[in-house]
Amino acid sequence: MRNGDDLEGFDGEASSTSMISGSSSPYQPTTEPVSQRHGLGGLRCDLDYLRGTFGRIKLAEVVLALIAFICIETIMECSPCEGLYFFEFVSCSALVVTGVLLLMFSLNLHTRIPQINWNLTDLVNTGLSTFFFFIASVVLAALNHKTGAEIAAVIFGFLAMAVYAVNTYLAIKKWRMNSRQQNSRQTSDYIRARTESREVDHRPEIQRLDA
């Protein structure tokens, strides 16, 4: 018969064996982080972008374009109406496109479509919005009837133009910086490859091994 010490030793060996076999078993329970799940459950708000310069500018653009669009929609009578219709089209288009870009950047959806150059897309949108807001605001200011809604629309149109112009300047600056970094990276890779090839040419023992 086994005494108490033998039983305790046997139990200790069994528990150690089970721990070792459990740790070495390939069938381990795994957990998947929630942030790595695909689909709508993987969406998250990028607060760093919204708190940054470009995020705040995008929010300001959406708000100003929305206010300008609301102001122009409250006008019931116009003669002529071409300036009003053009301003309405510009403010609505800027609101929709900028709102979509804000959602793409704030939810990191642009990272799921790497085939599109999102920085260039944002640059084109801000540049066109600056130009067309300027034209639409000037035309509406020249053809308005001095009503409160028209004056407010012109004011917010010029404010939106100014914010879009600042965004365009910062986007161009960022695009140039990224281009310079990419060019410098390619240049350094080329110099490194040339240096390695020259080292191989000056080491005959490597050539003999290759032969």
Image: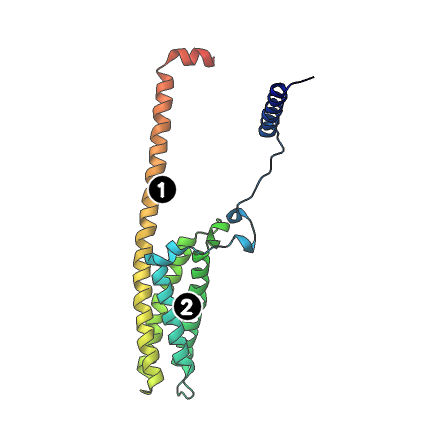
Distance from Cα at disc 2 to Cα at disc 1: 31 Å
| Local crowd size for mark 2, using a 10 Å CA cut-off: few (<14), some (14–19), many (≥20) | many
Callout 2, which amino acid? Ala
Q: Quadrant of residue 74?
A: bottom left
Q: Position of residue 100 (x, y in %)?
A: 46, 62
Q: Position of residue 210 (x, y in %)?
A: 46, 14
The structure residue drawn at horizontal position 33% and vertical position 60%, both measured from the top left corner, is: 168
The structure residue drawn at horizontal position 33% and vertical position 30%, both measured from the top left corner, is: 191
Q: Nearer the viewer, residue 54 or 192?
A: 54
Looking at the image, residue 66 lies above or below residue 47: below
Looking at the image, residue 111 lies above or below residue 15: below
Q: Position of residue 125 (x, y in %)?
A: 40, 62
Q: Earlier in the sequence, mark 2 or mark 1?
A: 2
Looking at the image, residue 168 lies above or below residue 190: below
- Residue 42, which numbered label? none
State the SS at label 1. Answer: helix
- Residue 94, which numbered label? 2
